[in-house]
């Protein structure tokens, strides 16, 4: 059984078939960029330079990968759990494993205060892993999501934690290194 099979669509009111799967996400995809200390990540690209690439609440894209049964992978940074919110209470139905196959969105880096969210949603009768802007995301900024604090290993290397550590260093009295 395909755990992502569903009826209807969260993005429109069509009960049977709709074109949302082809039309819901922006045609411009983010740029793959190497971020110091973090490896590859995704940089937002706006239609014209210096603009907002995504407004808060807008869909950025779909994270694709291989669907595998729950608990197939443990402590693997390429895995996200697929939670169906139409089941009460919301239930994880499978894992989405992006270690082997997937699109550019598997390169999204973790941030403890991310700019985007992973949101499972129904599009054209199928559950997909949508990526939604949590805030306005400007041209040239990194798109991040929250995977979990241990994404980078013991010391979190996300922008938010990096800034916090820098702030602590700067507060130290002069002369004491
Ligand atoms: Zn639709
Ligand atoms: Zn962090």
Image: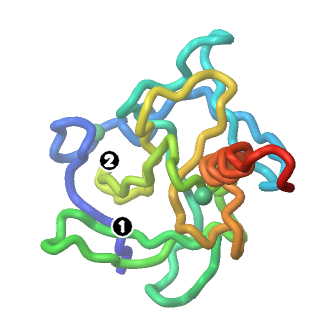
Q: Quadrant of the N terminus?
A: bottom left
Q: Is residue 105 left or right of residue 134?
A: right
Q: Is residue 14 left or right of residue 75?
A: left
Query: Quarter of the image holding residue 92?
Result: bottom left
What residue is at 48 percent from the left and 44 percent from the top?
A: 116
Report the image quarter containing ligand 1: top left
What residue is at 57 percent from the left and 28 percent from the top?
A: 27
Q: Earlier in the sequence, mark 1 or mark 2?
A: 1
Please tell me which residue lies in front, 47 or 174.
Answer: 174
Q: Is mark 2 within 8 Å of ligand 1?
A: yes
**CB-based contact (under 8 Å), mark 1 and mark 2:** no
Residue 11 seen anywhere in this rendered image of the structure: yes
What residue is at 53 percent from the left and 18 percent from the top?
A: 52
Crowding near the residue tagged with mark 2, few <14, some 14–19, many ≥20 C-alpha atoms within 10 Å: many
Place of residue 93 in the rendered image (x, y in percent of width and height, measured from the top left)? 34, 78
Place of residue 5 in the rendered image (x, y in percent of width and height, measured from the top left)? 32, 66
Give residue 43's mark: none
Kindly identify which residue carries mark 1.
4
Please tell me which residue lies in front, 149 or 102.
Answer: 149
Kindly identify which residue carries mark 2.
124
Query: Quarter of the image holding residue 102?
Result: bottom right
């Amino acid at each position: 059984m395909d755990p992502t099979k569903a009826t209807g669509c969260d993005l429109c009111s069509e009960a049977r078939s709709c074109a949302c799967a082809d039309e819901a996400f922006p045609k411009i995809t983010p740029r793959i960029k190497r971020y110091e200390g973090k490896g590859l990540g995704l940089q937002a690209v706006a239609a014209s330079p210096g603009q907002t690439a995504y407004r808060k609440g807008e869909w950025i894209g779909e994270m694709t990968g291989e669907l595998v049964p729950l608990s197939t992978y443990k402590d693997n940074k390429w895995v996200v759990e697929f939670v169906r919110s139409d089941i009460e209470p919301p239930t994880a139905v499978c894992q989405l494993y992006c270690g082997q196959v997937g699109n550019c969105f598997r390169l999204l880096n973790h941030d403890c205060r991310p700019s985007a969210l992973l949101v499972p949603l129904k599009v054209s009768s199928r559950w997909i892993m949508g990526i939604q802007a949590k805030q306005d995301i400007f041209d040239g900024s990194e798109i991040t999501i929250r995977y979990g604090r241990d994404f980078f290993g013991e010391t979190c290397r996300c922008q938010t934690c990096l800034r916090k550590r820098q702030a602590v260093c700067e507060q130290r009295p002069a002369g004491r290194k």
